Image: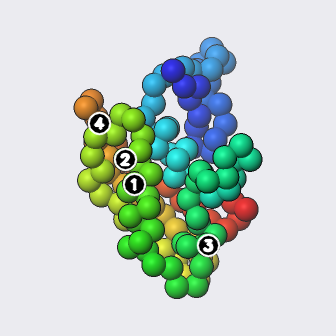
Amino acid sequence: MDILLDNSGDLLLDQGGDIRLENSVRQKIRIRILWFAAEWRWDEDLGLPYFEELLVKNPDTEYFEGLLREEIFNVDEVVQVKEVTILYDSQTREAAIQYVALTDLETIREEVKICRSME
């Protein structure tokens, strides 16, 4: 079970003010997508190389879509990654990552925004 987080990363509380526990594949995927390379001090090999590979002047978005596809597929419950698309804004160097992932129980569609201000 996971402690659920809202879209801003804060604890998601129920109407009584208690934390919510649930096995959320969507949240597991979101956390992996938002994990920047070398961000976790106990294993700097984890995370995605956003600053080095995506949030740059001329990123290879096809290559990075492959990295994202692999990262999403590495979530235990995911059985297939149907779609990964990066909408990149070269002016702001921000990206919107859209994906569709399948589990045995559900289809998950989501968009996650990545920007340089996350440094």
Name the residue beneath numbered marker 3: 52
Q: Which mark is residue 73?
A: 2
Observer-side mark, 2 or 4, equals 2
Contact, mark 2 vs mark 4 (Cβ under 8 Å):
no
- Type of amino acid at the residue the image marks with label 1: Glu
Of labels 4 and 1, earlier in sequence is 1
- Type of amino acid at the residue the image marks with label 4: Thr
Residue drawn at (45%, 25%) of the image: 23
Residue drawn at (29%, 36%) of the image: 103
Name above or below for residue 55 compared with residue 43: below
Of labels 2 and 3, earlier in sequence is 3
Name the spot of residue 17 as percent of width and height, x first.
66, 18
- Type of amino acid at the residue the image marks with label 3: Glu
Name the residue beneath numbered marker 4: 103
Name the residue beneath numbered marker 1: 70
Per the model, the C-alpha gap separating discs 2 and 3 is 22 Å
Of labels 4 and 3, earlier in sequence is 3
Circle 3 residues within 10 Å: few <14, some 14–19, many ≥20: few
